[in-house]
Amino acid sequence: QVQLVESGGGLAQPGGSLSVSCAASGRTYNIYSMGWFRQAPGRQRELVARMTNGGVTTYADSVKGRFTISRDNAKKMVSLQMNSLNAEDTAVYYCNSVSRVNVEGAEIQHWGQGTQVTVSS
């Protein structure tokens, strides 16, 4: 079992910055990707950014150039630096991990509890 615990987020004005972090514990040795999803009221959960163990990153088009994802050397923590925030970034942000469980390619995902990010004047 993997446990994901988020911290950070909160309130920011348009144009401001926030960060969120996520620490993984438990059975972390199979993790090959970690990242962030978000869900705004009335919308489906969407990928924000993710990074593989090899450093390959993926960003949503809406956050490219504004958000930066990073992972620590032990691959047990993932952080997201969010700059130039706008109201459309308001959402609950969820930490996500993907583990490869066998050589046939089976995967399992884990989720954090979510942390609120609100952008408002």
Image (cartoon, rainbow, N blue to C red):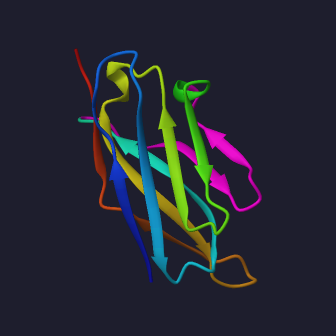
Left or right for 57, reference 69: right
On screen, 94 above or below 39?
A: below
Left or right for 69, reference 42: right
Residue 9: x, y in percent?
33, 42
User: How many marks on residues?
Assistant: 0
Q: Is residue 81 magenta?
A: no
Left or right for 15, reference 70: left
Q: Which residues are magenta?
A: 42-61
For the C terminus, give its image quadrant.
Answer: top left
Could you say which is closer to the camera, residue 17 or residue 97? 17
Could you say which is closer to the camera, residue 45 or residue 5? 5
- The residue shown at (57%, 67%) is 98
Could you say which is closer to the camera, residue 76 or residue 42? 76
- The residue shown at (39%, 43%) is 38
For the N terminus, give its image quadrant.
Answer: bottom left
- The residue shown at (48%, 49%) is 36
Residue 74: x, y in percent?
64, 69
On screen, 99 above or below 114?
A: below
Q: Is residue 44 magenta?
A: yes
Picture quadrant where residue 31 is located: bottom right
On screen, 108 above or below 87?
A: below
Left or right for 55, reference 71: right
Residue 99: x, y in percent?
59, 73
